[in-house]
Amino acid sequence: MSDEFDLDALAESFLEFLEGEWPKEKAIAYERSGQAYDAGLWAATAGLGWPALTAPEANGGLGLGTAAAAYLHAALGAAAAPAPLLGTLLATTIFGAAGAEGGHELLAAIAEGSLRVAVAEPGSAAVETDGKTVSGTVRNLLDAPGAGLFLLRASHAGRPGWLAIDTDAAGVSVARRALADTTRSLGDVTLDNVAIGEGRLIRPADPAALDDLLTRRACVALAADSLGGGEAVLRITIDYMKVREQFGRLIGSFQALKHRVADHHAALVGARELVLNAAALPDDAPDALLAALSTEAHVTALTADIARDCIQLHGGVGFTAEFSPHLYLKRAKLNEAL
Amino acid sequence: MMTQTDTLAPAIAERSFDPISKVGDEQAFRQEIRDWLAAVLPADWRQQWQKVREADLKGVMNWWLNERRKVGLATPHWPKEWGGPGLPFSYQIIVYEEFARGDAPELETFTISLFHTPATLFEHGTQDQKDRYLGGITHGTDVWCQGFSEPGAGSDLASLRTSAVRDGDDYVVNGQKIWSSASMHADYCLLLARTDPNGKRKHDGISYFIMDMKSPGVTVRPIRQITGESEFAEVFMDDVRIPAKNLIGAEGNGWNIAQSTLSTERGLLIFSATERIARAFELDGIEAKNTWMRDVGLRREYAGFYAEMQAVRLMVKRLLAELEANPDKASATLPTFIKLNWGPLLQRYGEFLVRAEGIEAQKWEPAIPGTGHSSRMRFNDFLKSYGWTIAGGSNEIMRNIVSERILNLPRG
Ligand SMILES: Cc1cc2nc3c(=O)[nH]c(=O)nc-3n(C[C@H](O)[C@H](O)[C@H](O)COP(=O)(O)OP(=O)(O)OC[C@H]3O[C@@H](n4cnc5c(N)ncnc54)[C@H](O)[C@@H]3O)c2cc1C
């Protein structure tokens, strides 16, 4: 269980692996690939057991909680990694929630990384179902184009729940919507009389509590992703300011520039405290949701603005796709909008 | 594949248009341009042009330049002697105002051709150079680019290292330029190169050339931008021979001449830019009336941007009034204040729209040529704002100019 894990060591291993597996050059080249996610990177993370992080131990998972997920997402953000693990976190949360039925067979596949999941936003509109089939549209589903399973909000007999739908089931179609942030993907899902399989309608015992937990975890993960991204893009920028010369000086020696990165750095130190605090609160802490929501709002906006300034601090090269700051800006703006 | 004649052919114009004949009556002149635009420009030109790919870009740009030419407005701000309509300044303003109001395509590929090249040659070119090169713009479709910046010389342009060595009747040029807008389409380049590496100051010893982009030894490599497009490129020069008659002004006087080139960005060009955004700004608010304009916080932010936008427009109008009264007496500082307000404002407003429109603004569509900074695709416009905050003197350089040269604060 969580206590046995040294979270710092875990965090270190996430970062180290991605630095090797997904260096800046790969991130920059990937931008043009048109892929929904990087299959090689996904397979590598699955090999390391990352999708198993938050899955219950009974289903082959590690049973870790929000804090471990935060470290994982901070590392993914730092690398601008196209590995759709947010859906994995939320799916394990839904299936792991007390009272969920029938998730077990899917959980094993999710934990081993053979099944990627796109999960509808908690609180978003539900599709109506009679329990046997379902029709409807879900717009703007994050990571839908690369997923094998959708977890959609459903309403059955006036009760809220979640529907697990195989993306290749008859009647399912996904229209991909290109994003500015090419490290993730988005799609509109249409369900046309799709049959609902045995145990695929999940009725949590306390849907509102599950929504809160999902919201909390999603917020912490997005805030962590932005924190990692903000720290990384600032580091890249500071490194550049230490080598770029104009007027016979390193541009990092201009106060007009170094004071700005000093402000950004100080703000990120605060942001890190917020994320760690929000991530470490127990799931049932009364302020867990508020901490997550406020942290997400603050940190995603902060990093978006830092990344915006990092392009400016780079000058012309920052405006090219051959340098990486724009990847962070685009990812940060999407995090802010989610 | 779109060509200028098939898909873009507008509804048959019911009559011919001649705005130039209305000079003397501003209202009639304005109305004629409006009527002409309404008749000649397909209402859905933006949708059509969105399908235009890099290879066809010149086709649509040439089409629009030629349509303008038919009514005497290819080079609306040029004097008669060089093939322009010789409009009084107040009429030139009306032209750009109406282009903005009527959403006429921006001739992005021809920016240097229409503004920087004449600004340079009018003042410093030989009769021969003017005769030879201006005609290619007034009568043809010559694309010019500006080869100033180098990998090592951006903000510190004067440190440029591309060398030009006299050899008989030629100069032999070696070096590299970067960020040269439209250079992959260009016929000619306004080139700064060092003819004397031993000048006292780094500004000395720079000379100004017209380089034929088809010369042997010129290689152009487009650079992919964060918007996904490639509007600028690197230009490599490997023993390129430029005839000595293509030197503009005196050898070693390039730095001063470059100031004339850049001064063109301080008049109708910035006016056109701000008027176009002002028009887009109005539409943004109207189109959002059932969405984010219903959000009190966002509406208030929008209103704040309105005031800032107006402040810049008023500064620009004052500048134009001064230029009209006497170009030599126009404020030297106002253009700096305008740019320092405008670039950051455009970026913050672009960011605001991305934020206000939520997930929809995160979606990516191919850019639309001819729409400049108001493609109205939120993310694209937001990203393009760096063109104003980095290019042509970055925000930071502008602040140095204000603080050190205008406010006389000590140099850091
Ligand atoms: C969209 C676009 C179009 C362009 N088109 C052209 C073109 O057609 N032709 C052409 O020749 N060039 C063009 N440029 C180049 C442009 O002029 C340069 O990018 C600009 O001068 C900045 O130079 P740089 O990119 O080398 O950045 P750098 O000068 O390396 O600047 C890096 C950072 O350091 C800051 N900095 C530099 N010096 C100081 C200082 N003294 N004090 C404080 N801060 C400082 C800068 O503001 C910036 O934030 C274009 C650029 C862009 C982005």
Image (tube, rainbow, N blue to C red):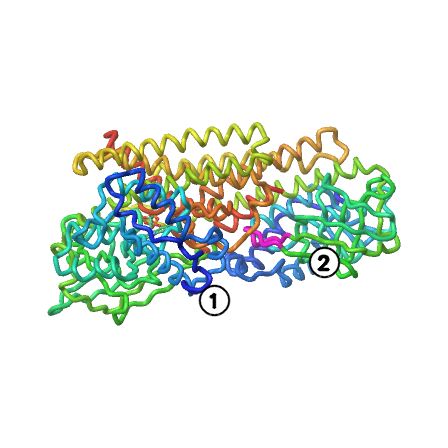
Q: Residue B56 versus residue B186: which sits nearer the camera?
A: B56
Task: Determine which quarter of the picture holds residue A112.
Answer: bottom right
Q: Is residue A248 visible?
A: no
Residue at which label 1 appears: B1
Left or right? Give the position of A165 relative to B203.
right
Q: How far apart in space, not on screen, are marks 1 and 2 (Cα)?
A: 30 Å
Q: Position of residue A332 (x, y in %)?
A: 55, 44
Report the disc number at residue A181: none
Q: Secondary structure at mark 2?
A: strand
Tell me the amino acid under the disc marked 2: Ser
In this view, which residue lies farthest toward the bottom?
Answer: B216
Label 2: how many residues lie within 10 Å, few (<14), some (14-19) or many (20+)?
some
Mark 1: is the Cβ under 8 angstroms from ligand 1? Answer: no
Label 1: how many residues lie within 10 Å, few (<14), some (14-19) or many (20+)?
few
Q: Residue B391 versus residue A281: which sits nearer the camera?
A: B391
Q: Residue at x 23, y 50 (%)?
A: B85
Q: Position of residue A211 (x, y in %)?
A: 76, 38
Q: Nearer the viewer, mark 1 or mark 2?
A: 1
Characterize the magenta stretch by its predominant secondary structure.
loop
Report the disc number at residue A173: 2
Q: Residue B355 versus residue B113: which sits nearer the camera?
A: B113
**Residue A5 on the magenta span:** no
Q: Secondary structure at mark 1?
A: loop
Question: Considering only vertical position in the picture, is B127 above or below A139?
Answer: below
Tell me the amino acid under the disc marked 1: Met
Write down the region rendered in magenta: A177-186
Task: Tell me which chain the residue with mark 2 is part of.
Answer: A
**Residue A182 on the magenta span:** yes
